[in-house]
Amino acid sequence: MTTDRETADRTATAEPTATDTAGNEAGETDTAGIEVKPVAGHIGAEIAGVDLAGGLDAARVAAIRAAVLRWKVVFFRDQRLDHAGHVAFARLFGEPVVLPRRGKASPADFPEVETTADRLELGGRFGMEHDEWLRRRRHTLLRGWHCDHGARVDPPAATILRAETAPPYGGDTTWSNLAAAYAGLSAPMRAFVDGLRAEHRLGVGYQPRPGDDAYVRHLLDRQTATLHPLVRVHPETGERVLFVNGYYVEQIAGLSRPESAAVLELLLEQATRPEYTVRFRWEPGSVAFWDNRATIHLAPSDNAHLDHPRTMHRVMLAGDVPAGVDGTPSEPIVGSEAGRW
């Protein structure tokens, strides 16, 4: 008989075997008539042989769900989803989030869909060009890495993003596997971080403009912060996940500022090591479906100066309140309540 700790450690550290990932030497699986092709050693798989707009039976839904849990992000090419089909596909896996505020590019008739071209408007709302706004939000190499809405007490469980238009070059998205990152830590470091909690706060690290800054006032008016476990236990797989990112994490509770800064830098560098990542080149009709509980991602910053449109549509699935290794759930500080957006 094994202890809970031993079972969790084995789950978190187990490397994929031939039977875990593949039905053949190429690392491909063929389940329910679909083909799952891993594209990197720790994260990411392309799924072929499925039309997301054509209706999916229970076996195919189960196979896609299993692939998302195993590979953390899966990709589909050449799909013909419209807004209605996008929402219908999402509903097969959970309850879509309805955001209370979206930009004018998002479709009015589909409140579950957020169009990410809205992001290009954000700087203008606060008196900045988009590139200045981006520089002030992502002023270090690690700052842009995030999970979606990580400052909430109940971040989304998953995100499904589809490309309507994509540039011929640039605009890639990168994801990292936080379960693999945790497993890659030394045993003493895992034992250390297992019991820690960290404050995740909207607007962390933003560098204000001199004088009055409309974005700072916006952040103060709509502040969101939560005390999350630094290591969360995945509610479906039981894996331990290094729940850290550069976009929201403010401070590790119980550590001094210098200690917290040093530990966070170490953990962020661990979480974004190249071997734990996968990078995806978008094309019109591409769809990415990722587990927001076990990944962080980096939106592109190499295409804002290019004269090529990049229009993406996002649907997120409602998530639960994270729990730490000891079972203690996250605690809201300000600005969010479980189940209320």
Image (spheres, rainbow, N blue to C red):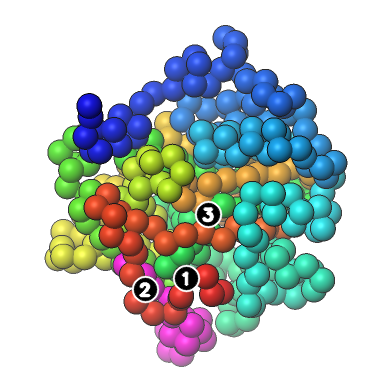
Identify the image quadrant of residue 249. bottom left
Dot 3 corresponds to which residue? 157
On the image, the x and y values in percent for residue 103 come to: 70, 74
- Precedes in sequence: disc 3 or disc 1: 3
Pointer 1 residue: 338
Q: Amino acid at mark 2?
A: Pro
Proximity of marks 2 and 1: CB atoms separated by less than 8 Å = yes
Q: Looking at the picture, does residue 279 appear above or below residue 116?
A: above
Q: Nearer the viewer, residue 182 or 203?
A: 182
* Foreground pick, 187 / 168: 187
**Could you tell whether 268 is left or right of 175 in the image?**
left
SS state under label 2: strand
- Residue 229 horizontal/vertical position (percent): 30, 58
Q: Residue at x 30, y 36 (%)?
A: 8
Q: What is the span of residues highlighted in magenta in the rendered image?
A: 210-228
Q: Which mark is residue 234?
A: none
Q: Quadrant of the N terminus?
A: top left
Q: Residues within 10 Å of mark 1 (few under 14, many from 20)?
A: some
Q: Amino acid at mark 3?
A: Ala
Closer to the camera, 206 or 240? 240
Quarter of the view holding residue 100: bottom right
Give yes or no for contact between labels 3 and 1 (Cβ–Cβ under 8 Å): no
Question: Measuring 22% from the left and 41% from the top, which residue is drawn there?
Answer: 190
Q: Position of residue 219 (x, y in %)?
A: 46, 81
Residue 68 shows up from this direction: yes
Above or below, 37 relative to 133: above
Residue 46 picture location, percent across and down: 65, 31
Q: Is residue 87 left or right of residue 5?
A: right
